[in-house]
């Protein structure tokens, strides 16, 4: 069972979070040949100050 962790800045709409999850899952099936319906994702939201990353 592949596990994917996705970290986002809080406040994104549910559709956005689900969309990101769908894109990651579809890419894993296509590129990594993960079996269909083998999906386990943890999507966590953080306050803006809780993620420090290059904006580019």
Image (cartoon, helix red, strand yellow):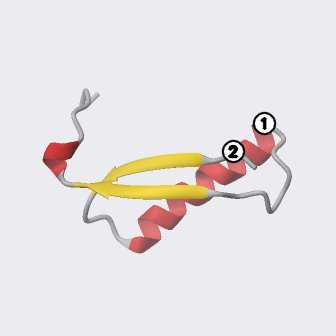
The answer to whether the residue labelled 2 contacts the one labelled 1, judged by CB atoms less than 8 Å apart, is yes
Q: Secondary structure at mark 1?
A: loop
For the residues labelled 2 and 1, the Cα–Cα distance comes to 8 Å
Name which of mark 2 and mark 1 comes first in the sequence: 2
Q: Label for residue 14?
A: none
Q: Label for residue 27?
A: 2
Q: Secondary structure at mark 2?
A: helix
Residue 52 in picture, x, y percent from top left:
21, 34
What residue did someone put label 1 on? Answer: 32
Q: Residue furthest front?
A: 1
Q: Residue at x 72, y 43 (%)?
A: 28
CA neighbours of label 1 inside 10 A, class few (<14), some (14 to 19), many (20+): few
Q: Residue furthest left?
A: 49
Classify 23 as above or below 30: below
Q: Residue at x 46, y 57 (%)?
A: 43
Residue 5 in picture, x, y percent from top left:
51, 47
Quarter of the picture containing the C terminus is top left
Residue 41 in picture, x, y percent from top left:
58, 56
Q: On the picture, is 18 further left or further right than 2? A: left
The image quarter in which residue 37 lies: bottom right
CA neighbours of label 2 inside 10 A, class few (<14), some (14 to 19), many (20+): few
Front position in the image: 45 or 31: 45
């Amino acid at each position: 069972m592949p596990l994917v962790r996705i970290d986002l800045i809080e406040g994104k709409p549910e559709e956005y979070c689900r969309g990101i999850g769908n894109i990651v899952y579809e890419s894993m099936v296509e590129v990594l040949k993960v079996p269909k319906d083998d999906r386990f994702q943890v999507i966590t939201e953080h306050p803006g100050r809780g993620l420090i990353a290059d904006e580019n």
